[in-house]
Structures are given as C-alpha cells and as structure tokens.
Amino acid sequence: MRRNDDYIKKIIRIAAVTFAVYIAMKYALPVALPFLLGAFLAVSLNPLVEKLMKKTRAKRGLLSMLAVGVILTAAGAVCYFVGRSVCTQLTALAKNADAIQGSIRTFVCDCCEMAKQSFGVDLGQADALFLKMESKVRAGVSNTALPYLLKNSVGYAKAVFSVMSIVLISIISGLLILTDYPKIREAVCNSQTGGAALKVWRHAKSAAGTYLKAQIFILLVISLICVAGLCLTGNPYAVLAGMGIGLCDALPFIGTGTIFVPWMLIDILNGKYILAAVYGVLYVICSFVRQILEPRLIGEKLGCPPIVVLMSIYVGIHVYGAAGVLLGPVSVFLIYEIVACQE
C-alpha cells in the first residue's frame, strides 16, 4: 500500500514540475530572455576577465567593457560580411527572376516531353500547362501573399524592434552582471532560493547546454560544408543556399536530403550528371558528418537514447511551435533534473 502511495506521489510531483516548467517556458521565458542571455554572456566571459585582472591589475569594469566590446566587434564583423553576401545574392536572385522562371519552364516542358517519349504518356501542351500554372501562382501571390504581407507589416516591424531591444538589453545586462559578477554570485549562493536554483542549474547545464552547443556547432559545420561545396560548383547563390540547407538540416523532419535529392534529380533529367554527382557527394558528406558528430556531441554526453531527444523535439514543436526544436529538449532536461533533485 505504501509503495502505491509513493508511486502516486511521484506521478503528482512529475506532473506538477512539468506544468511549472511549461508555464515558465511559455510565459516567463520571453520576459526573462534578455537577462538570461546577459547572464550567459557574463558567465562565458568571466573566466577571461578574471585572467586579465590577474595579469594587468586593471579594474574589473574596464576589462568587462573591453571583453564585451571585442566579442561584439567580432560578432558584428561576421554578421556584416555574411549579411552582405546574403543581401547581394538576394538582389541577384531578384534580378534573375525571369531567367529562373524560364529555366523552370524549360524543365517542365522537357519532363513532359520525356514522359511522352519514354512512357507514351501525352501530357498535352506542356507550354500551355506551365503558363496556366504560372498564372495561378502569380494570382495567388498578388491576391493572397502580398495583401497578407502588407496587412502584417506593422507586426513584422514590431518583431524586428523587439529583437533589437532584446539584443540591446542582453548586452547591457551582461555588461552589468559581468562588472559585479563576484557580488552577484555571492548573493545568489547565500540565498535559499538562489542556492536551490543554482543546484538545479548545475545539473541541468550539462545536459541542456550540451544539447544547445552541439546543435549550433553541427548547424555551423553543415552550413560551411554546403557553402564550400556550392562555391566549388560556381553557384552564384552559394552563401544563401548553403545557409538555408544548413537550417533545413537542423530541423529534425526535413534534413539536407529534402533539398539535395530533388536538386540531383533535376540535374540528372537535364543531363548535368557531374553537377548531380557533386550534390550527391555533398548530401552523403552532410549525412555522414551529422551521424558522426551527433552521437559524440549529444548522445554519449547526455546518456539518453536519440529517440528521447527526437520525441522531445516532436512534442516541443506541438506545444511551443517552431521554438520547440530547442525548448522541447531543454524542458525535458529541466523536468528530469528538478525531479531528480527533489528525490
């Protein structure tokens, strides 16, 4: 009987912790996000500032400003060059819209002709079919997409302003926390609530931090491979396409194959066998790199099966939306660590 009571209490405890984590992630996290990012920045830079203080004997505030300034300058330089490349390629893509449309039209007509010659299937006037499809797409864009974008333009402007505000507040809060880091750490450790939070944080940091860092690292590696491979093929949109493929690979239900496999088939149908082979090699390399890095960076260090991570991502997407790709696994790690600390 006592065993059943303990089992019921454990279920109630897990349910209560799960609900609390959901409320925190859903409603408290957006408000606290700038300060959490600032705290992360301060914790990351504190070892560097401590070393510089021992070597130079300079004031902590000055060294904190210097460290944050160097990091921001480096990050800004990377964002500038990447953003410049992306904007240049987007402009070129817009200028070449008619040429791209003509290539698609030629491809559709060739496919229809190939189907007729190979299988005896007459798809009618391919050119007329394409023009009909094109007119429907244009009508959909003009009647639906453009009004939707114009209607929500104020919302997009608010979103951009919100992101800029979060970045600014994160930088300022990070600098302030870094300047007074020893005092803040001592106050948190001496507080009963802060001590409990630190206990959970120390346990959860290894799991959630490992997952986040691993996913970001894999995303960067896959994106660099794709950008480098597309540059070798002479693709004028290498940076834009490579970053897009890298983002697709980070999503668990899409992956690089969603882009590379159709690309290969199109090039094979157009007789571009070497280009198709290059895309095939890139697809194999990206898949191989993920299969090698993911278990080493995530599975082995977390000590949990990959299926658990996949399930947490799937549930997270349904609960939190697109942010669930990250918030789902982080919520599961937090729930597990909080329940473990209470036992």
Image: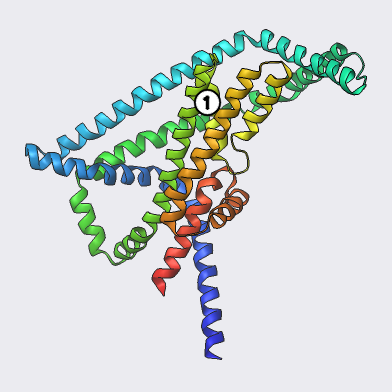
Residue type of the residue flagged with mark 1: Gly
Position in image of residue 116 (x %, y %) = 89, 18
Q: Nearer the viewer, residue 300 or 239?
A: 300
- Number of other residues with Cα within 10 Å of mark 1, as a class: few under 14, some 14 to 19, many 20 or more: many
Q: Regarding mark 1 in the picture, which secondary structure is present there? A: helix
Furthest residue toward left: 57
Q: Does residue 321 lie above or below 116 as drawn? A: below
Q: Residue at x 56, y 80 (%)?
A: 8
| Residue position for label 1 | 242
Q: Residue at x 50, y 41 (%)?
A: 290
Report the quarter where the N terminus lies: bottom right
Q: Is residue 45 left or right of residue 339?
A: left
Residue 62's image quarter?
top left
Report the quarter where the C terminus lies: bottom left
Position in image of residue 266 (x %, y %) = 70, 21
Q: Is residue 126 left or right of residue 327?
A: right
Whether residue 92 is visible to the viewer of this picture, yes or no, is yes
